[in-house]
C-alpha cells in the first residue's frame, strides 16, 4: 500500500509531502517525493536564486500532462512560516504573492504541485525596483541551443566592455538566460529600456545572429532577445527550477568557460544533484556585487536621439504604455487606422 505522506527536511525545517508516490513527471518516473528531495538537495543554490523574491508557481496538481495553471496570488491557509510579498501588477492592482524567505518554501511549493518556479527580479523589501537585469535568448525556428550560446557569448563581451559581471544559465529548454545583479534604483520601465538598448547593440554587432523584432514574421532564423521578460510581472524560471518537460529538465547555472560544452538535456532533476556536488554552484558569488544601469540608459538615449529608436511593443495584456508604438504586426499595419 502506498504511503499517504512523507516528510522532507530542508534547512532545519521538516515539510510534509502528501501523496509522495504520485508521479510529478510520469515519463521520467519522478514522484512528488523525488521532486521534493531534489529541491532539498539543491537548497543552497535554489534559495540563492529565490531569496526574498515574490514567486509565481506553475502548478500541475495531477502531475505533468494534467491540467496546469500559474498561481500568482498566495492561496488561503498558508503555513504560518510561508511568507508573502505585496506586488503591483501592470493593471495597477496589487496582490500578495508567495515569497521565498527560506529554502523550505520551495519544498512546500512541490507539495502544492508546482513544477516550475518563476521569481520576480525584485526583493520583498522593494518590489518596484529590480535588483536583477535579465536577458533572455530565445531560439527561433531554424536555430537552436548552439546559436543561443553564440549570442550569449556576444552578450558576455558587451557586459565586459560595460563593466558588468554577467552570469549565465540554461533556460531548461533551448535557450539561455544572462543575469546581472543591479543596485535597486531603477524602475521596471528603466530596466526594460536598458535591456532593449543592450539587445539593439547586440543586433548591430551580429545582425546575422540576433534580432530584437517583437513580431515573429520579422525575426527570421535568428536568436530573439526577449526584452519583455524585463517588464513588470514577466518572469524567467529560477536557477535550479525544474521545467514542465517530460524529462524534468532544470534551468542550470553554468560557468562561461563550460558553456560551449553543455547541452540543455544534460541537466535534469536526476543529474543535477551529483553534478552540483562535483562542480559547485556556478552562481555562488552572484550576490558579490551590484551594478548600475547608467551606461545602458545612456546607450538608450543615443538610440533615441541619434537613431530614432524609441520604445518597443509591450505584451498584449499590458495597458497601453507612454511612448509605445502600435501593437500591430507590420504585415497588418496598413489595415489599421491611425
Image: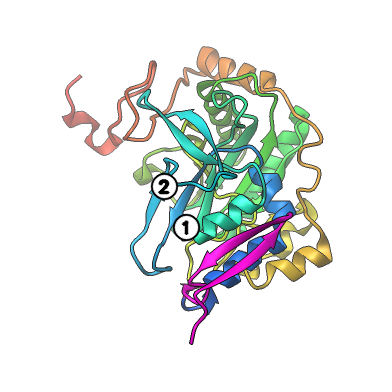
How many numbered marks does the figure carry?
A: 2
Q: Earlier in the sequence, mark 2 or mark 1?
A: 2
Please state the extent of the stretch shown in magenta in the rendering.
1-25
Percent coordinates x, y for residue 62 in the rendering: 39, 68
**Which x, y percent locates residue 103?**
67, 51
Confirm whether residue 266 shows in the render: yes
Q: Residue at x 58, y 71 (%)?
A: 6
SS under mark 1? loop
Where residue 174 appears, as percent x and y from the top left, is 54, 59
Q: Residues within 10 Å of mark 1 (few under 14, many from 20)?
A: some
State whether residue 209 is above or below residue 318. Answer: below
In percent of the image, x 64 and y 53: which residue is there? Answer: 104
**Can residue 247 be seen?**
no
Camera-side residue: 214 or 231?
231
- Image position of 23 with respect to 125: above or below: below
Q: Which marked residue is nearer to the observer: mark 2 or mark 1?
A: 1
**Residue 250 quadrant:** bottom right
| CA separation in Å, label 2 and label 1 | 10 Å
Q: Residue furthest top?
A: 305
Disc 2, SS:
strand
Q: Are marks 2 and 1 in contact (CB under 8 Å)?
A: yes
The image quadrant of residue 291 is top right
Identify the residue position indicated by label 1 in the image: 112
**Residue corresponding to mark 2:** 71
Query: For this view, does 277 lie left or right of residue 300?
Result: right
Magenta stretch, main secondary structure, is strand
Horizontal side of 153 relative to 300 (left or right) equals right
Amino acid at each position: 500500500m502506498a504511503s499517504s505522506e512523507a516528510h522532507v527536511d530542508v534547512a532545519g525545517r521538516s515539510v510534509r509531502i502528501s501523496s509522495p508516490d504520485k508521479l510529478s513527471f510520469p515519463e521520467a518516473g519522478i514522484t512528488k517525493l523525488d521532486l521534493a528531495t531534489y529541491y532539498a538537495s539543491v537548497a543552497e543554490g535554489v534559495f540563492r536564486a529565490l531569496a526574498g523574491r515574490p514567486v509565481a508557481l506553475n502548478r500541475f496538481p495531477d502531475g505533468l500532462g494534467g491540467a496546469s495553471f500559474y498561481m500568482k496570488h498566495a492561496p488561503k491557509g498558508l503555513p504560518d512560516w510561508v511568507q508573502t510579498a505585496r506586488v503591483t501588477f501592470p493593471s495597477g492592482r496589487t496582490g500578495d504573492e508567495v515569497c521565498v524567505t527560506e529554502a523550505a518554501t520551495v519544498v512546500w511549493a512541490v507539495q502544492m504541485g508546482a513544477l516550475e518556479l518563476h521569481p520576480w527580479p525584485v526583493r520583498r523589501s522593494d518590489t518596484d525596483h529590480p535588483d536583477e537585469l535579465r536577458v533572455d535568448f530565445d531560439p527561433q525556428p531554424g536555430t537552436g541551443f548552439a546559436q543561443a550560446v553564440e549570442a550569449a557569448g556576444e552578450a558576455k563581451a558587451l557586459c565586459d566592455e560595460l563593466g558588468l559581471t554577467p552570469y549565465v544559465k540554461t533556460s531548461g529548454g533551448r535557450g539561455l538566460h544572462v543575469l546581472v545583479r543591479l543596485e535597486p534604483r531603477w524602475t521596471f520601465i528603466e530596466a526594460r529600456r536598458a535591456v532593449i538598448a543592450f539587445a539593439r547593440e547586440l543586433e548591430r554587432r551580429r545582425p546575422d545572429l540576433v534580432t530584437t523584432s517583437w513580431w515573429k514574421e520579422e525575426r527570421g532564423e535568428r536568436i530573439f532577445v526577449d526584452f519583455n521578460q524585463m517588464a513588470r510581472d514577466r518572469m524567467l524560471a529560477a536557477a535550479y527550477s525544474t521545467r514542465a518537460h517530460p524529462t524534468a529538465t532544470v534551468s542550470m547555472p553554468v560557468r562561461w568557460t563550460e558553456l560551449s560544452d553543455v547541452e540543455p538535456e544534460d541537466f535534469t532533476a536526476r543529474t543535477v544533484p551529483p553534478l552540483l556536488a562535483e562542480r559547485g554552484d556556478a552562481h555562488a558569488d552572484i550576490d558579490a556585487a551590484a551594478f548600475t544601469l547608467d551606461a545602458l540608459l545612456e546607450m538608450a538615449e543615443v538610440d533615441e536621439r541619434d537613431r530614432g529608436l524609441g520604445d518597443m511593443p509591450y505584451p498584449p495584456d499590458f495597458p497601453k504604455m507612454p511612448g509605445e508604438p502600435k501593437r500591430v504586426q507590420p504585415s497588418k499595419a496598413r489595415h489599421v487606422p491611425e
